[in-house]
Amino acid sequence: MSESEHIILTDVCKEYRARKGAVQALQSVSLESRKNEFIVIKGPSGSGKSTLLLMLGAMLKPSGGSVVINGTNIYSLNIRDRAAFRADNIGFVFQMFHLISYLNVLENVLLAAWKNGSPGESESKAQSLLEKLGLENRVDHTPGELSAGERQRVAIARAMMNNPTLILADEPTGNLDQENAKEVITHLKDFRDSGGTVMMVTHGDVCDDIADRTLFLKDGLLIEDQLARSKVNG
Ligand SMILES: Nc1ncnc2c1ncn2[C@@H]1O[C@H](COP(=O)(O)OP(=O)(O)OP(=O)(O)O)[C@@H](O)[C@H]1O
Ligand SMILES: [Mg+2]
């Protein structure tokens, strides 16, 4: 991982223009990630957590401020280049999994294949990710034939398909029992340990032990928990 592989948010704000007036979802958020960090974001409903992740995911333009990921100011790119940047650098995991119900597990993971070479190479990459996630016996199942934990592991394989440097996870354990939640966190932690950065929104305490930093959002303002244990060197 090079020095430029991290996230810098500078004075990011977001105002949604709703029919009945504007909503200030984020007010001047600044944040810098360190190398391969697992950052957890907590906060009450409506505090701006998903808004923040969407902006980090190159999917929602801030009303002000800048989002720089791996040295690229992502909202200065045109839509096409931003889509390419997103596919190349970022993996997503959602609370509701968002798998395609009529595609099987392997096809769902392959759907994310961006430019990993030939179809054969993509397929062997998807197969090896699924094996790593303990899903080698489920490749031709559809999502409806899987447990919730298995579905989320498919989503993690999909998120990792393009070797991202950043995984954004919005309540990835929200629909899982404690055991499956822990397994999902373990996979995200492995991704961090192999050099990636994780930004995860959660209400729970399932990753309190392994988070490098915990940030709190309240009314669109970011508060860094001074007491949060930091395992990051430098
Ligand atoms: N498209 C939109 N138009 C108008 N207002 C919006 C829009 N999306 C979100 N908001 C508002 O912005 C604020 C932040 O929303 P956001 O979804 O980021 O909250 P959150 O912290 O993720 O909440 P939750 O924990 O319930 O998922 C909320 O007050 C919400 O009503
Ligand atoms: Mg949300």
Image (tube, grey):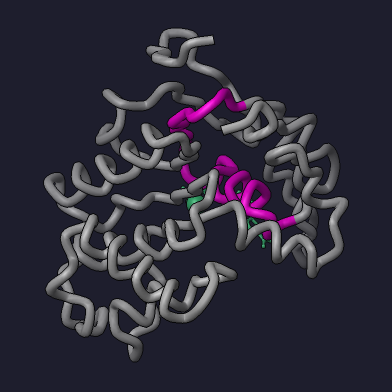
Answer whether residue 42 is visible to the viewer in this image. no
- Of all residues, the one furthest to the bottom in this rendering is 102
Residue sitting at 55 percent across and 50 percent down? 50
* 196 versus 60 height, above or below: above
The quadrant holding residue 207 is top left
Q: Is residue 132 left or right of residue 51?
A: left
Q: Residue 5, image x and y in percent? A: 63, 35
Q: How many marks?
A: 0
In the rendered image, the quadrant that contains the N terminus is top right
Q: State the image coordinates of residue 65 (x, y, percent, origin top left).
A: 83, 37
- Residue 28 appears left or right of 112: right
Answer with left or right where residue 55 lies relative to residue 136.
right
Compared with residue 184, is residue 39 higher up or lower down, i.e. above or below?
Answer: above
Q: Which residues are magenta?
A: 33-60
- Quarter containing the C terminus: top right
Q: Residue at x 20, y 65 (%)?
A: 150
Residue 54 percent coordinates (x, y): 62, 53
> Which of these two is toward me, 2 or 80?
2
- The residue under the point 30% across, 38% down is 204
Task: Look at the image and say whether residue 59 sits in the magenta stretch.
Answer: yes
What residue appears at the point 53 percent right and 67 percent down from the top-left corner? Answer: 116
Q: Is residue 202 above or below residue 157?
A: above
* Front one among 89 and 217: 89
Q: Which of the 4 image quarters holds residue 229?
A: top left
Q: Is residue 62 above or below residue 123?
A: above
Q: Is residue 119 magenta?
A: no
Q: Position of residue 124 (x, y in %)?
A: 34, 71
Is residue 28 or residue 228 the one in the foreground?
228
One can see residue 69 in this view:
yes
